[in-house]
Each structure stands twice: as structure tokens, then as C-alpha cells.
Image (spheres, grey):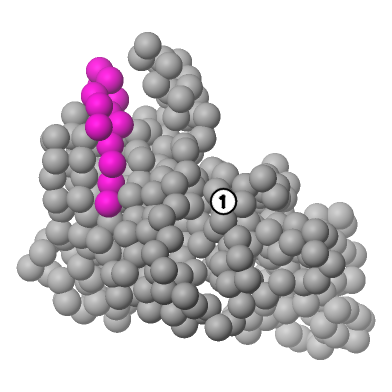
Amino acid sequence: MSSAIISLIVTEPEAGLSLGAIVANRFGERGRQAAIRGGLWQHGRRVSADTPARAGETLLVRLPPVGGYRDAPLTLNHIIYEDDDLLVINKPPACYTGDTPWDTQGSVLAVARRLLTERDGLVPTLHLAHQLDAGTSGILVISKHPRANAPLQAAFNHGQVDKRYLALCAGHPPTATELITGHGRAAAGRWRLYEQAEIGKVLPNGQRVKRAHTQIELRRQYGDVALVWAKPLTGRTHQIRLHLVALGCPLLGDERYGGPTTVAGMLIPHPLLHAAELALPHPRSGRLLNIFCPPPSIFTGVLKCFG
């Protein structure tokens, strides 16, 4: 899902109007929705729909994506664990974890905030402790109190959180393997892997190649499809996806990295990666929380294709 970006210059007659009114006048309902959902940008920053316009200024409008806005299909039943400090959610697949440049209202975080507000009558202070890709389902940890933020960040940044993912991939991965590579952006901006010797190298974009470390374990082979455990020991963007590609075994549904989008005639609309297990110290008590989450039905549907 992507959003069209339009650049416009505020005219003299539009000066003093709200930015929301201007885009609604120019683009109709699509412009009105873009303003309401947070798709207005000036000087590299998101601006609100009621911001007064000044003649000659440039406004970037991120119009609704193809198919319109979609809110994360989240309900209170997706809550796995909750206390005064933590909210742990079984994130549905095919939805964004946090805000996107074109939408501040449809993410898991935004919908969770609305659900808790309706339930409790108070607007909660929620912060993501980590991220999951849009296509990835499973365990997502959110802080509910500012006192939990620093301990959670320290736990995730310093290797105190154990995570295991279930993945369905194409090909024949080894029974057990460990990959240590470099990780960074390619010239075109996409994430890619680098040789170990390049870890620490400064890229043309000024960023350094970072270390990426994943353990992969085969659970079962189904013809040319495999069910694997993936344990990331570092937390790089698309790390598991890229390491499976390096093994010649891209995730089913991972069109971006060459994964098949159909299996036995079944459409796979997103990468089949699921955050299934997580263990972390509680940010206040320090006690170890062990959280488990079964995969979504599409995993079962694919495996049924193989009997």
C-alpha cells in the first residue's frame, strides 16, 4: 500500500485559510481525508489540518493510498497481557504498527489507543517498545506508562529480550544454521546485507554497516516449503527476511525480496512471518515474562495444502 504525494504552493487568495480547507477545496473528499488523517507536511514536518496557510509556502499532501485508508483490524481480544505498565498485543498481519507518513489513525498503536480510551474512559499514554513489519503478525510490546519506557528500551537494546519467530519459506533450508552478516541500506535506499568484513564500514549515506545475527532452525519440510524457527540476536530492519533470502529461502508472500505469492493455488498476500515467543524482564518488577502467541490462520491454511 502506497500513497501519492502532491506538492502545491499556497496562493494569495488561499492565505489565511486552514491547510485542511485548501486541500479539501483542491482535491475534494480525498483531500479532506488526507488532512484529517495526518497527511499534510511542511518543511519536513507533519502539520495539522487547522494550521493557517501563508501565501507562497509549499505544502506536501499525501493522498489516501490505493483502496483508501484501512484501520488495523484490532479488538480487545488481541490483548495477550496487560498491567499498569505493559500492553502486549497479538498484532494482526498486513497492518502498520505505528504512524505512516500518510496516516496517523489506522495503525495498531492508534487503534489500541482508541480501544483503551473507549474501555477505560481515559486516553492512555502508549509507546511502542519495538517494531514489527506491516506484514508480520504476533507479539508486540507497548508501554502504558512513561516509567516503563527506559527499562524497556534498555532491555531491547542490550539483548535482554529473547524472541522467536515462526516463518514459512520457500526452498530447503539447513536443519540448523547461524548467519552473521553486515546490514545497511543499498544505494537505492532498500535494506540489504553486507559481508562480515564490511561491518562498521561507512556507507555513502553516512550510516555504518551494522552487525546482523540470526539463528535458523528447520521445524519441518513440506515439499518445497519449509516451516522454520528464526531467532534474531540483533534487531535490524527486515533481518530475518534478508537472512532467509541469503539462504535461498525467501518467505512465502515476501514479494519485495523474491518470495512466491502463491502456493498450491493459494494467494499469499503478505510475508508469512509471525512473532510467536518472547521473554523479557518486566520493566518495573524485573520478573521474567514468557509470552506465547499462536500463528494466524493463514499459516494453517498453507500447511493444509500439504496435507
User: Which region shows up in magenta?
Assistant: 219-231
Q: Is residue 171 above or below residue 84?
A: above
Q: With respect to residue 221, does 108 lie above or below? A: below
Residue 221 is drawn in which quadrant?
A: top left
* 224 magenta-colored: yes
Image point (56%, 51%), residue name: 80
Hey, which residue is sitting farthest top in the picture? Answer: 307
Q: Position of residue 208 (x, y in %)?
A: 24, 77
Q: Secondary structure at mark 1?
A: strand
- In the rendered view, does 143 fall on the left or right side of 294? right
Between residues 132 and 83, which one lies in front from this camera angle? 83
The residue located at (14%, 50%) in the rendering is: 178
Say whether residue 306 is visible.
yes
Specify the quadrant that holds the C terminus. top left
The three-letter amino acid code for the residue at tag 1 is Ile
Task: Estimate the x, y position of residue 295 in percent, counting from the top left.
Answer: 47, 37
Instruction: Name the residue beneath numbered marker 1.
Output: 80
